[in-house]
Amino acid sequence: MKLGREKPKSGDILPEGAPVKVTPSEYNGYRFASDIVSALTSLIVGLAWPVTALIIVSYLVQHGSTFVSDIQELMKGNKQVELTADVKSGVRFVVIAQEVQKGLTQQATTQAGGNAPQGADVTGIQQVAAQAASQFSSPAGDRTLVTKVLWVDDHPQNNLGLAYAFQALGIIVVCVDSNAGITEAFATSGGFDVVITDMSRDAVAGRAAQPEGGLETVNIIKGQHGSVPVIIFAGGYAASHANDLLQAPVIAITSDSRVVFSRVTGIASKKGKKG
């Protein structure tokens, strides 16, 4: 929405994108708020990204009054204001950054045994979320919707925060709890851009424990989908193999969710640029 031309008369129809000039006296209080909400509603309806649309609706429900108040504050003392910012990209950036931060915070809390991040860790998460949002909220970032992650872990609930952060960026995450699901997952999806795996698998439902089940995952990917990179995301194994020489298809061995996030978003960003 751009403002920069004389206010039209009632009933006038403007061409799409036509700038309109307004004065604070003409757009005060509820009338101004109504126009902003109406414009954003039209934006949401026209979005091609359903996940983002749902996030924006949630954001407006929670923070709509603050958003309108901020814009009204901007209008004070100005006889004429020209809004040249891309509303769609601006709102998208804010809500994506917020949702990514929420996911990364949850992941950090889970890994810390329920202790929420504090101080520098909070600042670091905010910076990572803002950087990711700046890359993925632009029109070019829409292409990353085709980026797909296969996550093999017998305790997928431990990865909910990180998976949520990926999906807030439009990255598709498919989870399977054992190597038995890999072949079907690839067949259903048509392929993945990266695989994340844990290492040790517990004995469940008659399945024997697999202390190094992640290595079998690596071998399956290497043998059947050799061009797909693999990230080993495991606590104890990463601690004892952090200095190992990486061999394809493995591109990282880590217990740090920030490393996983960085590697996956890097792959998605490169794929978007190639598109």
Image (cartoon, rainbow, N blue to C red):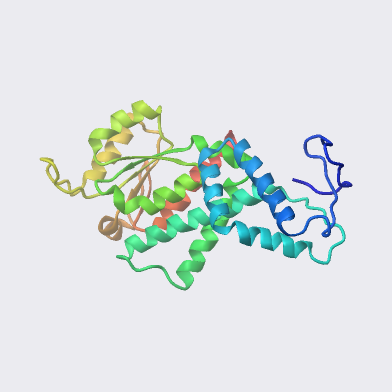
Q: Residue at x 36, y 27 (%)?
A: 188
Query: Which quadrant of the view contains residue 230?
Result: top left
Q: Quadrant of residue 121?
A: bottom left
Vertical arrangement, residue 233 with respect to residue 45, above or below: below
**Image quadrant where residue 38 sits:** top right
Residue placed most toward the observer, 263 or 37: 37
Left or right of 209 in this view: 115: right
- Tell me if 127 is positioned left or right of 222 in this view: right
Q: Residue furthest bottom?
A: 119
Q: Looking at the image, which is closer to me, 104 or 254? A: 104
Furthest-right residue in this view: 6
Which residue: 49% across, 43% down? 267
Q: Quadrant of the C terminus?
A: top right
Place of residue 63 in the rendered image (x, y in percent of width and height, measured from the top left)? 57, 58
Which quarter of the rendered picture does the N terminus lie within?
Answer: top right
Q: Visible in this render: residue 132?
A: no
Q: What residue do we see at 46% from left, 45% from top?
A: 167
* Residue 4 locus on image (x, y percent): 85, 49
How many numbered discs sit on the rendered protein? 0
Above or below, 258 against 179 in this view is below
- Position in image of residue 205 (x %, y %): 13, 41
In the displayed structure image, the side of residue 123 where residue 79 appears, left or right: right
Q: Residue at x 50, y 42 (%)?
A: 51
Closer to the camera in the image, 140 or 26: 26
Please say whether residue 56 is visible from this viewpoint: yes
Q: Position of residue 164 (x, y in %)?
A: 42, 49
